[in-house]
Each structure stands twice: as C-alpha cells, then as structure tokens.
Image (spheres, rainbow, N blue to C red):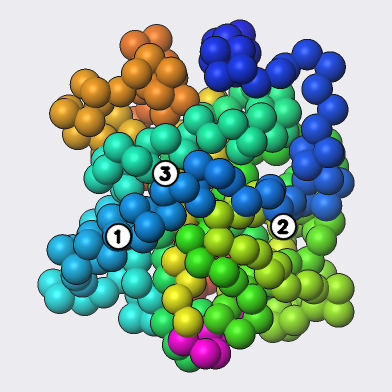
Amino acid sequence: MTEQIVEILKELEIQTENNENEFANFFLENGYCVLPQSDFILNNLEKFRKIIDDLMTKEDWRGGWEGKEQYMKFNKKFNKGANRLANLFNKDKLFLKLITEKNLLTVLAEIFQNDLKFGALDMREPLQGTGWQELHIDWLPRKNSDDPIENVICFIFLDDTNVENGAMRIVPKTHKKIGWIDDYQKDKSSHPEEITVDVKKGSIFLMNANLWHSGTTNKNGLRRRVLYLDVRRRSIPQLLNQRIYLDENTQNTLSETEKFLLGVAKNDEIFDERVFAVGDYYRKHFKTDVVVREQE
C-alpha cells in the first residue's frame, strides 16, 4: 500500500527520495507544525467560505451530526456554542481537492512514512463567548515510548485566528508522554508551558492527536471557521467510514488517487465500524458522558 502512496506523490510531482522536510522534523519533535499559507486555499478562500455559510443555512440545527446520529435530537444543535458541519467530502468537490494539497501531503507522507489515509473533514466555528476547553488529547493515550503515530489532525484556517477570537492552545512535546493527562495533573485548566497558536487564513496547522491541547474563548466574536481534516494509518478505521458516508454519486466521480487516499479503492480493507472515535474510551476512563474528541 505504501508503494501506491509513493506513486501518487510522484504523479503530483512531490519529491519522495532523500526528503528531509523541516516541517515534518519539527512536527515529530514537538507534536505540531504550522505550514505556510496555501496558495490553493487562499485562491479559493471565498469559495470555501461561501460553501460553508450556505451549508450552515441549509442544514441549520442538523449541522455536524453525521457520525453521531444516535444522539441526535430534533431541533437540537450538536454544540450550542459553535456552528458545525460534518462529512464535507460528500458535500462539494472543492473539499476533495484538499487531500492532494501538495505541501500538506508532502509533510503527511513523511510523518506517516507513506502509510496514511484521510477519514473525515468537518468544520467548527466557536461563537462569541464560547470555545474554551480543558486540556485534552484526541486519541488513545500512548502505552509505550516507541508507539507509532496513529492519528494526525490538520486544522485548515479560513479566517485569521489569534487569542482574541479563540486560538488553540497547546503544550509542545506532550505527545511523547505515556498515559492520560490526569496521570500528570488533575487540574487541566492550564499548563505552565502552554502556548497559543496564532495563524493566518490559508494556513494549515498539523497536530499529533496525542498532543495536549484545547480551544480558547472567542472573546471578540470575529469569525473563526476552521476545517478539521482527520488522518490515520491505513490499518485503523476512519473517523467516518467513507464507504458509508460518501454517497454513490460522490464515489463514482472520484479519481483513483482520491479513492485510494480516502480508503475506498477496490482493494482497500473494508472495516465494519461506521464511526471510530475515542469518545467511548474517554467515557469509560473518566466515568462521564463528556465526549472529548467530539468537542473539537
């Protein structure tokens, strides 16, 4: 399977041999990196924004419920403090082009050593006065120091983001820690080494899902639309099973490259899981109904 990724990279004119990527190296050491503003995203920024705003109007309170249908209640937003959308690969072809954005795929290929697939694209926009979270991780805690990277989340910013409108805060290098955050500190409201991630529209922030992080409060109410692109190793079920959540019409229009990157190619492993989030593991550990992964 990794050979197919190499061929895809070559087709996209992405160098794979002797590739020492500074962003990938920084990511592996620190648990995150910020890629330069993407020409593709900037050139299509207004299109992305319009599609998202139109979808929010169309879906209204139903926005963001895909993958969580069993909890859905009539006329109840998934998150009162945020606008949300989910399953965006199935809603406009422009979103599909993100999985072959060259800078992004170059770095991801090195991080995962060519063993990767995309599993969901969602959107979240915290409203004024909301967005604050406790520090948490978005994947199962590491058990051993040599555990491979299994899940990376790519945050694609459609608006400038800073401390005033709810920038993310992270604790660098905590992706290397073994166990849960509360094994180290019971108070998860802050950490002395935390930093906020200020980014410009069109930028992509990559984060190891085991890095300690959280959202912060949108104080000034300025828009902060962020796309969340979930990436995993090919042997792991997707956040949203794309064979199920991509309708037949969408799947029939995919290129062979897109099918492979989305895990729906003819020879790809078929998973039974409709959704594979870590919420159940969190509920069991913390004995609570809070679903940390789904708060993002």
Q: Which mark is residue 211?
A: 2
Q: Tell which circle, 2 or 3, labels the residue nearer the N-terminal end.
A: 3
Kind of residue indicated by mark 3: Ala
Q: How far separated are the C-alphas under marks 2 and 3?
A: 19 Å
How packed mark 1 is, by other alpha carbons closer than 10 Å (few <14, some 14-19, many 20 or more), is few
Q: Residues within 10 Å of mark 2 (few under 14, many from 20)?
A: many
> Of helix, strand and loop, which one carries label 1?
helix
- The residues bearing labels 1 and 3 have C-alpha atoms spaced at a distance of 20 Å
Write the start and end of the magenta stretch as one range: 216-221
User: Which is more foreground, mark 1 or mark 3?
Assistant: 1
Identify which amino acid the numbered label 1 is placed on.
Lys
Q: Residue at x 71, y 24 (%)?
A: 113
**Which mark's residue is nearer the viewer, 1 or 2?**
1
Instruction: Say which residue appears at 27% left-offset and 43% top-offset.
Output: 92
Query: Of 229 and 145, which appears nearest the observer?
Result: 229
Viewer can see residue 64: no
Q: Relative to 191, is 206 on the left or the right? A: left
| Residue 116, picture quadrant | top right
Which residue occupies the extreme front position in the image? 43
Residue labelled with disc 1: 50
Q: Is residue 146 left or right of residue 202?
A: right
Residue 177 locus on image (x, y percent) = 82, 55
Label 2: which secondary element? loop
Q: Compared with residue 66, is residue 171 higher up or lower down, i.e. above or below?
A: below
Residue annotated with mark 3:
120
**13 vs 73, nearest the viewer:** 13
Q: Is residue 220 magenta?
A: yes
